[in-house]
Each structure stands twice: as C-alpha cells, then as structure tokens.
Image: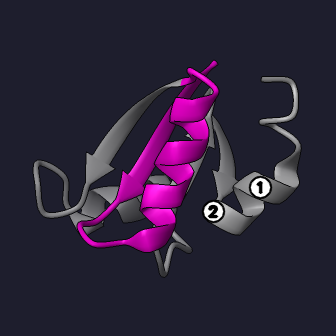
Amino acid sequence: MKAIIWSKPDCPYCVRAKYEFEKRDIEFEERVIGFGWTREQLLESVPQARSVPQIFIDEKYIGGYTDLMNSGELDSQ
C-alpha cells in the first residue's frame, strides 16, 4: 500500500492522517503546499479540493481525514 497526502504546515488533520499511516507502517508521500508543491498542482489532482489533507491510497482518491477513517482502507493494516 502506498499513499499520497496533500497537506500544508500547521494542519492538525494532516498530522492525524500521517500518524494513522505511520502507526500502521504504511508508506506515504507528503506533498506540502508551499514547499515544493502548489495549490494549482493539488487542484489538478483534486479539482473539488477546498481543504487539506487530500489523500490517495494506491492511486485511488479517498478524500480528507474523516473520509480516510470512514473508508475502511486502513482496517486491513
């Protein structure tokens, strides 16, 4: 399993999402807006994004932190 987390500094839900992946030893790439990544790049991936985090698992769009926790994607880990 490989995840991508679009985030920004000082985002508490981004921190929580990363923690959920770390405690399950799931590899993830963090794309921090303003640090190598732009808002425009996020919107290319998720046109309807209005907040962060925006999460993908194995190239499947999951949504935000609440969507991640309700998706069942982490249950098998």
Q: Is residue 56 above or below residue 17?
A: above
Q: Is residue 62 magenta?
A: no
Element at label 1: helix
- Label 2 is placed on what type of residue? Tyr
Residue that mark 2 sits on: 65
Residue that mark 1 sits on: 69
Q: Nearer the viewer, residue 63 or 9?
A: 9
Q: Are marks 2 and 1 in contact (CB under 8 Å)?
A: yes
Q: Residue furthest left?
A: 35
Q: Is residue 71 above or below residue 9?
A: above
Where residue 75 appears, x then y in whole percent? 87, 34
Viewport quadrant of the N terminus: top right
Q: 48 left or right of 8?
A: right
Where residue 5 appears, x then y in whole percent? 45, 47
Give the extent of the magenta segment: 1-26
Total count of labels: 2
Q: Is residue 60 above or below residue 33?
A: above
Q: 58 left or right of 69?
A: left
The quarter of the picture where residue 21 lies is top right
Where residue 19 appears, x then y in whole percent? 51, 45
The quarter of the picture where residue 63 lies is bottom right
Would you say residue 53 is visible in this rendering? no
Q: Nearer the viewer, residue 2 or 14?
A: 14
Q: Residue furthest bottom?
A: 50
Q: Is residue 7 magenta?
A: yes
Query: What residue is rendered at 72% in x and 67% in y?
Result: 66
- Label 1 is placed on what type of residue? Met
Would you say residue 31 is visible in this rendering? yes
Where residue 41 appears, x then y in whole percent? 29, 56
Please tell me how crowded label 2 is: few (under 14), some (14-19), or many (20+) other residues with Cα within 10 Å: many
Q: Nearer the viewer, residue 54 or 21?
A: 21
Q: Is residue 60 above or below residue 1?
A: below
